[in-house]
Amino acid sequence: MKKKISLRVIKRVSFYYEALLKLCLPDDSYISSMKLEEVTGVSSNQIRQDFFYLGISIGKQKKGYQVKRLFNELKKVLLVDKKVDVIVIGAGRLGCALSEYKLFKVRNINVVALFDVKEELISKSEDKGSHCAPIYHIDELDGFLSEHPAIKIALLTLPENSAQAMLDKLMKLGIRGIVNFAPKILKAPEHVKNIQIVNDCIGASLYKIVYQIYNKA
Amino acid sequence: MKKKISLRVIKRVSFYYEALLKLCLPDDSYISSMKLEEVTGVSSNQIRQDFFYLGISIGKQKKGYQVKRLFNELKKVLLVDKKVDVIVIGAGRLGCALSEYKLFKVRNINVVALFDVKEELISKSEDKGSHCAPIYHIDELDGFLSEHPAIKIALLTLPENSAQAMLDKLMKLGIRGIVNFAPKILKAPEHVKNIQIVNDCIGASLYKIVYQIYNKA
DNA sequence: TAGATTGTTAATCGATTAACAATC
DNA sequence: TAGATTGTTAATCGATTAACAATC
């Protein structure tokens, strides 16, 4: 029933979505594909093509797309119309920064807990002066995931030597999506299917920047 | 002279590069395109096609590619054969985490300094118990960049309300590449050319994960 | 030698762009 | 009405895959 949408389309749709978030237009106003081109950099032809492909045909000639309806449609495509709970493994600087990351909130991504081996980081409910989610000891991970079977995604901010072992463990516990920030490329074992791993999204973006800047010099 | 290499190719090349880093093979050993397919997930056909396109023709039939030579070729393509200095604006948790990020090191990306408005974060040279680069007051940014004109890239970890103003300022100071971690999509002003901005690489990867996991459910 | 693996061309596939009739 | 903008088809473009001769 659901057609497979390529990740390129998903990426562009996320641009459209972000643009609407950012523009803060009244719900009942209209936005045209040309206007969307201005703010997203994606051509109006491409935008209409995407909408056509996605079955979004809510446009009105001469006006464009009603902001609220378009927003809802895009939400559905991105599957962010429901809240997504995730956990963070590793409660160091990066881990805590992630748990406060605001763009997660607008996307309905919710860091429910962090886990770490270091006793001194553990803080059940007291806030430690930040908006960080509660930090638990890693030994409690097993029990926690049993109690929260809906959690399917984990963000890994671990040292490189413990990242792969943690990945293996997480998969056994039912985690199906990993964003790995450890400075090591992780791979799912051969036999495991349906696991999504994104390695080092930070570094990948820098490759691109470095390439584009120094290439033109 | 230089042909324009698409970002897709760059991305795959970064996979090959990471794979070589990770495998830690002896410099004088050989690796075949089939073996590279195993560790990168990119088909051997694609790999050879990429090498052909990039003018990397150092393969030996029946053996493959000499690890050291291939490594050097890939380095050249990725332009990471020289050290790239970058600065970080915003010395909060995320900023400090970035300055210690190990995958930057293997890529010759070097965080030389952080800048922040908060007086209490400033630490000229003393280390504060971490491997964080020195933190300066934002007022010193201007002078610092004058003294280090080779710095072309800045990572932004600022609150959303100050990010756009900082972007404008950085461009005036000669910065040409921005990786923006602020929870707001930034855009270069119309008239400015040759600026590369990557917004929210962290969130973008999560969109993909969320989509792939919950789509299949 | 026979088998393995490259470099390179050709075929296929998919994504983007262009164009325009329909119509608000 | 005339102008603007959609939805949709067709044309173009680029990227991937397949195939295989060359040869170590």
Image (cartoon, coloured by chain):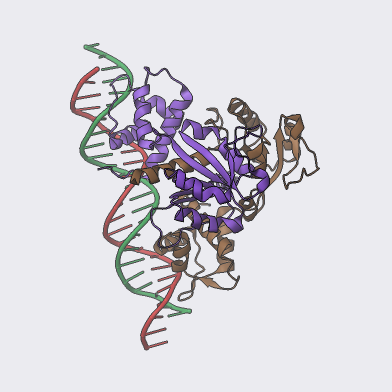
Chain colours: A brown, B purple, C green, D red
Residue B9 as seen in the image, left or right of residue A173: left
**Toward the viewer: A64 or B202?**
B202
- Whole-percent x, y for residue B100 in the image: 57, 35
Residue A197: x, y in percent? 55, 37
User: Total number of numbered labels?
Assistant: 0
Q: Position of residue A79 (x, y in %)?
A: 59, 53
- Can you see residue A179? no
Which residue is depicted at the point 71% across and 29% down?
A117
Give the left or right position of residue A173, taking residue B110 as reference.
right
**Residue A95 in sight here:** yes
**Residue under the image location 76 percent in, 46 percent down:** A129
Tell me: residue B60, above or below residue A84.
Answer: above
Nearest the viewer among B19 and B119 is B119
* Apparent side of residue A35 relative to residue B31 in the rendered image (left or right): right
Residue drawn 73% across the image and 41% down it = A148
* Left or right, residue A147 beside residue B118: right
Q: Quadrant of the C terminus of chain A?
A: top left
Rendering coords of residue D9 (x, y %): 35, 63
> Which one is nearer the viewer's eye here, A83 or A135?
A135
